[in-house]
Image: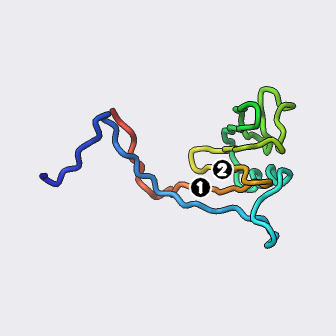
Amino acid sequence: MDGKITPPANGLKLINLKSRVIPIYPDSPKRNGIKPNELLPLITKNFVSNAYVIAYLYSYVMVGKWENNSLLFHDPQQFDESKILKLRVFNREQELLVWKSGNELKARLRKDDPKARIVCCSC
């Protein structure tokens, strides 16, 4: 071996992103999950700019946007916070991931480090 890193057979380069993960815990020390009615305030607190949304519900998947402190879907009446299995709200700087665990929702926020050098994938 000559010490060089050989690229994978598919020709892609590894992307090395520097980010930090922040677990989301409610104010109450008696539980470690969030309630469905705490979801919109949580998104509002962490996303001041527009973002994309993917909601995995029991029977279907919804794709939409977060704009002006509102979730916007093609058919907003179908979105039921109590039916969430997984929800992703993301933009170029961060991602909020919410998932169902037992009878409650858990969440974490991942923020990219703006000072980190991001290597693009290239073929």
Instruction: Give the residue at mark 1.
Output: 110
Residue furthest to the top = 74
52 relative to 10 in the view: left or right: right
Q: Position of residue 38 (x, y in %)?
A: 83, 55
Give residue 88's quadrant in the image.
top right
Q: Looking at the picture, does residue 33 appear above or below residue 78?
A: below
Question: In this rendering, is residue 88 above or below 33?
Answer: above
Q: Marks 2 and 1, how far apart in space?
A: 8 Å
Q: How is the image coloured?
A: rainbow
How many numbered circles are shown? 2
Dot 2: element: strand
Quadrant (top left/top right/bottom left/bottom right) for the C terminus: top left
Q: Is residue 119 left or right of residue 63?
A: left
First in sequence, mark 2 or 1: give its number: 2
What residue is shown at x 71% (from left), y 32% (from top)? Answer: 61
Q: Counting other residues with Cα less than 10 Å from the Cα at mark 1, is it few (<14), some (14-19), or many (20 or more)?
A: some
Residue at 19% x, 50% y: name it. 4
**Pointer 2 local density, CA inside 10 Å: few below 14, some 14–19, many at least 20:** some
Amino acid residing under circle 1: Arg
Where is 113 relative to 5, above or below?
Answer: below
Residue ranking furthest to the bottom? 29
In this rendered view, identify the residue nearer to me: 52 or 108: 108
User: Do the CB atoms of the residues marked 2 and 1 lie less than 8 Å apart?
Assistant: yes
Residue drawn at (79%, 58%) of the image: 34
- Residue sitting at 78 percent across and 26 percent down? 74
Q: Nearer the viewer, mark 2 or mark 1?
A: 2
What residue would you read off at disc 2?
Answer: 97
Q: Position of residue 2 (x, y in %)?
A: 12, 52
Q: Quadrant of residue 75?
A: top right
Amino acid type for the residue under numbered disc 2: Leu
- List x then y, in percent, for residue 91: 61, 44
